[in-house]
Amino acid sequence: MSAMTSAMPEPNRPDISRSEPPQSAANMMEVVTFRVGDQEYCVDIMVVREIRGWTLPTSLPHAPPYVLGVMNLRGTVVPLVDVSARLDLGPSSPDPRHVVIIAMVAEQIVGFLVSAVSRVLSIPRSAIQPAPELAGRPSGPSPAGLIATPEGLLRLIDMGALLPPAGHRISA
Amino acid sequence: MASVSDIKETFFQECDDLLEALNDGLIQIGGQGSPTEVDSETINAIFRAVHSIKGGAAAFRFNALVDFAHAYENTLDAMRAGRLGVTQDLSDLLQRAADHLADHVRAARTGEDLAPSSGTDLLARLSASLSNQGVSNNQDEAPPEFAPLALSFDLGLGLGDDTLSGRKKWRIGFAPAAGFLESGNDPVHILRELAGLGDLDARPNLNRLPALDDLDPEILLLDWQIDLEGALCEDDIRQAFDFVADLCKLEITSLQEVTFAAPAHLPASDAPPAAPLPSVTGPATAAPTPRASLRVDTDHVDRLINLVGELVINQSVLSRSVHEAGLAGQPTLAAGLSDLRNLSREIQEGVMSIRAQPVKPLFQRMARIVRDASDLAGKRVEFLTLGEGTDVDKTVIEQLVDPLTHMVRNAIDHGLETPEARLAAGKPEAGKVRLSAAHRSGRVVIEVSDDGGGINRPKVLHIAQSKGLIAPDATLSDADIDALLFLPGFSTASSVTSLSGRGVGLDVVKSAIRRLGGRLTVASTPGQGTTMSISLPLTLAVLDGMVIEVAGETMVVPIAAIAQTLQPAPDEIDHLGMGSGGMVVRLRDRFIPIVDLGCLLGFRNVAIAPDKMVLLIVETDTGAICALAVDAIHDQQQVVIKGLEANYGRVPFVAAATILGNGRIALILDPEDIIGFDAKAQATLSEKEDLPCLP
């Protein structure tokens, strides 16, 4: 079999590598925008798995305050992070109108509680500015970038930075 | 395309099956009352197994394995030919050789080398067994490592081997009558059916065909000469022609006797000369125990198990919602829901059983442990197994190997008396060790029992006292004394033997069993023997849990860890000083520290009032004990274990999670962790400022 295949001439194929991908696709980024309190954030759409309504999670002992607990995602145990509390915007008081963004972060499936999900935007990568270092800023992760939109400031969030730091354990 | 390593893996999987078949056969030989009358089919089966292993091994150049298998095969061959009668000694030799063969297979699999000296003794015995019978054996002088012995597939692969494997070659002359097609028959169907019976080579005879212009398509002018090879007899072939028996001429000859015989009535003179018989594929291809089985990636099965677990939960959530909506009275809805429930349960059971495997291979491994251990201990042991067909989760089986090995060795080393002591006690010299498995009320119970002297309780007590494990003046019940065996560092052997007595003992076994969610118990009657029982959940994916409530959270505690539950009377609870911060409960004159679960887990700051608390007495393998104070006990139920670590990480005091019937997650607590923490906390609590839970 293999001898036959190797004996066959390589078919002529058009050289597709010459035609370059369209300018826009490579340099654009699709993001899901969401609201936490009264601030607008966005996250790379590639990490978002699905968006669900809020359900009461099961508390975890000795978890950081912004880890609300774990919830059942069709049989998978998924931790739920309160984005507002994590960003030092004060703990949310969640109700069924709140929304959970299920994201795949570093091989983990994690739910992020936000106030509302707004829309999907396509933004040029060049429009993302690095977040300035702020002196005296409260603790908590800072945005990975800032985007100025006609509607106002959009903060790009790296979901991975919202997770509890590795090795978070109770000190026995 | 399958890579070489894939093929190798397949070979090793086949080896497992073949070794199992080999052991089966050997047990039959060993178990037959009169060892000289051994079923020849049994010997053939053994021979085939060894031969197949050798054949496969030769293809991968596992020379050491091939050499040993070959020597083994020589002895089996002599038995097969009737030159060697089966004796007790020989049966023993064959068994040990099988053990060594398994070692070789394992070594080939892992790529390690067996010690060069290993097996030389067996090889010598194997060849001695032959020379006793005057059978010449070229391998006699060859040391096992002496490299490429001329071993190949054609060794002993004559036609005789074909009869042995049940494969026969048949030649069939099939000449349909001219009106064959009129009756609606078609020779193609018959040829296809024959092809399903074995390797088919059909050659049509075209001599009678007229020119195309003269052809009448409704008259069949072909006849066939068919060579068929397979494990079949003449009747099998005749069956294929059942419906056309009177519409054709049929001649069936066995090619074993006739090398070439074209049926006389066929105008066979111009038929193409019979192709040389295909070179024999050899018995290596004939699987000795064809088991209809499917090798599936365990990931697929686990995924299925997960999904089915969800289905069951979903179903119960659905039926709850229907109930809450007040629709339960609707007959069609109720009936539909109940059907759905039954179906999902059945699917769940079916899927769970995919992971289950019979314990037989495990028991066969233990048979070997018994042989090795009885040699070392110098005790003759009769090993009995019961319930080999009992299905247990594959993972459980794998994790049972070590504990069970230990228990079996323990039974031989400590359980059975010395031969002299046995005779003195009026028992047969050979001790009995029995290994049994059975399903009992949703659990698997595996028992190792011996007919030895039973636990020597005074001795156990004395040792425990001299080792300071118990107070010198303690009075203990028999059960309490037996339980001392499971304390860490306890070993009753007066001398350290290579079998046991190294102080690593039953405590290790006990914790291994507990890790599997099982329980280990011991029962013993002086003079009559000891039985150790392992009771295990059917699968690792499920746990027997006690559903409890703590500070409004529903949680699960593994029942295996719970010694007792109680609602303490106020006078049973004592407050220790504020310095130690806690309370203790008095239980049979023992003070057990109370741990308020809600405080420990950080769900509340003030411990529950003593008159409202329910206590779970939990115990670790090491004997550490504590009382968990909870708000309520709801229910006992089997829960499906879900990992937390993949998506979050380790959570203190929590072993895993599960999903309850209402679709919500409940955490499964880890009593070991809690007790371990509590012990540390007791030591350091007074130094801490943020004391949790001062009552």
Image (spheres, coloured by chain):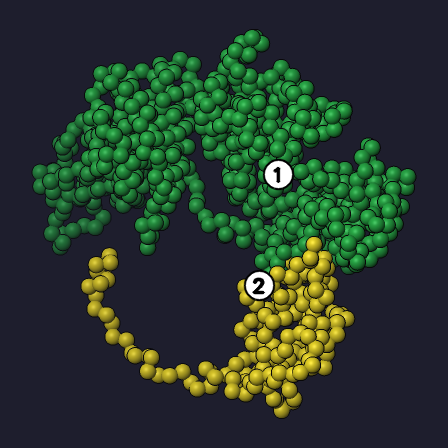
Q: Residue at x 21, y 34 (%)?
A: B149
B251 versus B78 height, above or below: below
Q: Residue B455: image x %, image y %?
A: 63, 21
User: Can residue B334 be seen by looking at this rendering?
Assistant: no
Q: Residue B168: image x %, image y %?
A: 25, 32
Circle 1 sits in a helix, a strand or a loop, which is it? helix
Residue type, numbered disc 1: Ser
Which chain does the yellow colour mark? A
Q: Residue at x 55, y 16 (%)?
A: B417
Q: Is residue B558 left or right of residue B166?
A: right
Q: Chain letter of disc 1?
A: B
Which chain does the green colour mark? B
Q: Based on the displayed image, in which of its 4 quarters is residue A23 positioned?
A: bottom left
B408 versus A87 height, above or below: above
Q: Depth check: B515 or B378 in front? A: B378
Q: Read off the residue under disc 2.
A: A108
Q: Residue B287: image x %, image y %?
A: 34, 36
Q: Residue B219: image x %, image y %?
A: 20, 46
Report, in whole angstroms, how far the alpha carbon at label 2 lies from the one at label 1.
31 Å
Q: Among all residues in the image, which is located at the extreme left?
A: B269
Total labels: the figure holds 2
Q: Read off the residue under disc 1.
A: B511
Q: Residue at x 58, y 9 (%)?
A: B425
Q: Are marks 2 and 1 in contact (CB under 8 Å)?
A: no
Q: Residues within 10 Å of mark 2 (few under 14, many from 20)?
A: some
The answer to whether dots 2 and 1 both sit on one chain is no
Q: Chain letter of disc 2?
A: A
Q: Is residue A133 left or right of residue B323?
A: left
